[in-house]
Image (cartoon, rainbow, N blue to C red):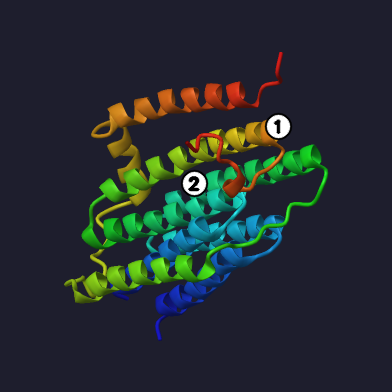
């Protein structure tokens, strides 16, 4: 087994186990910590795919930003309610059934499709390619993203402000 | 390594996230499920970009990650607001709009 395959299966195992823990854990706080683990493992998968820049972004924004926000929200809401947040699942059977059917449907198409057996050789540095594309082909979406962030910032502030 | 293992992994992650969204009672728990689903999509995008030798998927992943962060910030602000008003985070109890 090659090093890449070994790394992939190790990461896949961690990723699947921590994802299952996210949706099944009784303690909401543990769920968030498992989500952090899953997101870092995903960054590892990005590294396997030679996208170092995206792996860094994933860890900085997702595992850093999102997890911090969620933990902060849990702490704030626990204080507001004054009791520990526990969470349970409802409709496990029907939910599991729907998920399973969709999984089988996706796998049906994935296994029947003609997929490349090996990755093509890298044409150049992927980070450089992303940077160039972002400022040429995708300049307008890139600028719109800034507007979206401004809107999200104002929206979050508006929702979370204190009542006058 | 072919492309197939990556797609299968992403499919499994996506359905695990979907299961979380469908079964969680807690609104924050549902948001975490959505995170997992988006994450699975990112794995797919990066894998296709690598194996198809096309950088569009990488740029798209960058956009997805950034937009997800904005989505979580607004979503959690709404959850906190709902907490303040209704004193609950159970999605089943948030039926104010129900006719």
Label 2 marks a residue whose chain is A
Q: Residue at x 64, y 41 (%)?
A: A69
Secondary structure found at label 1: helix
The C terminus of chain A appears in which quarter of the rendering?
Answer: top right
Residue under label 2: A57
Residue found farthest to the right = A82
Residues A82 and A108: in front is A82
Q: Secondary structure at mark 2?
A: helix
User: What residue do we see at 35% from left, 39% from top?
Assistant: A131
- Residue A52 in sight here: no
- Report crowding for label 2: few under 14, some 14 to 19, many 20 or more residues within 10 A (C-alpha): some
**Residue A107: x percent and y percent?**
30, 73
Return the residue nearer the eye: A101 or A73.
A101
The image quadrant of residue A140 is top left
In the image: residue B28, left or right of residue A29: left
Q: Does mark 1 fall on the same chain as mark 2?
A: no
Q: Is residue A134 above or below residue B52?
A: above
Q: Chain of mark 1?
A: B
Which residue is drawn at the image coordinates 69% and 60% (left, top)?
A30
Which of the image's four quarters has the N terminus of chain A?
Answer: bottom left
Spatial CA distance of label 2 from label 1 is: 33 Å
Q: Which mark is residue A53?
A: none
The single residue placed furthest to the left in the displayed view is: A114
Q: Does A84 sit left or right of A42 as displayed?
A: right
Q: Nearer the viewer, residue B84 or A160?
A: B84
Label drawn at residue B84: 1
The percent coordinates of residue A63 (x first, y second) are 58, 50
Q: Position of residue A3 (x, y in %)?
A: 44, 78
């Amino acid at each position: 087994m090659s090093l890449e395959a070994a790394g992939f299966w190790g990461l896949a195992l961690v990723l699947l186990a921590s994802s299952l823990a996210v949706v099944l854990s009784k303690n909401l706080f543990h769920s968030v910590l498992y989500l952090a683990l899953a997101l870092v493992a995903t960054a590892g998968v990005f590294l396997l795919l030679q996208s170092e820049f995206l792996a860094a972004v994933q860890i900085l924004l997702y595992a850093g930003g999102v997890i911090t926000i969620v933990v902060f929200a849990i702490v704030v809401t626990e204080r507001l309610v004054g009791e520990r947040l526990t969470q349970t699942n409802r409709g496990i059977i029907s939910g599991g059934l729907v998920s399973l059917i969709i999984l089988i449907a996706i796998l049906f198409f994935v296994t029947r499709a003609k997929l490349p057996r090996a990755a093509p050789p890298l044409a150049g540095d992927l980070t450089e390619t992303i940077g160039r594309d972002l400022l040429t082909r995708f300049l307008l979406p890139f600028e719109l993203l800034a507007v979206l962030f401004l809107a999200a910032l104002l929206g979050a502030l508006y929702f979370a402000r204190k009542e006058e | 390594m072919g492309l197939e293992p990556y797609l299968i992994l992403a499919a499994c992650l996506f359905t695990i996230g979907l299961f979380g969204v469908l079964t969680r009672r807690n609104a924050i728990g549902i948001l975490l499920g959505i995170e997992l689903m988006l994450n699975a999509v990112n794995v797919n995008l990066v894998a296709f970009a690598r194996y198809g030798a096309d950088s569009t998927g990488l740029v798209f992943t960058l956009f997805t990650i950034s937009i997800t962060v904005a989505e979580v910030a607004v979503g959690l602000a709404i959850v906190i607001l709902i907490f303040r008003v209704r004193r609950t985070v159970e999605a089943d109890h948030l039926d104010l709009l129900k006719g």
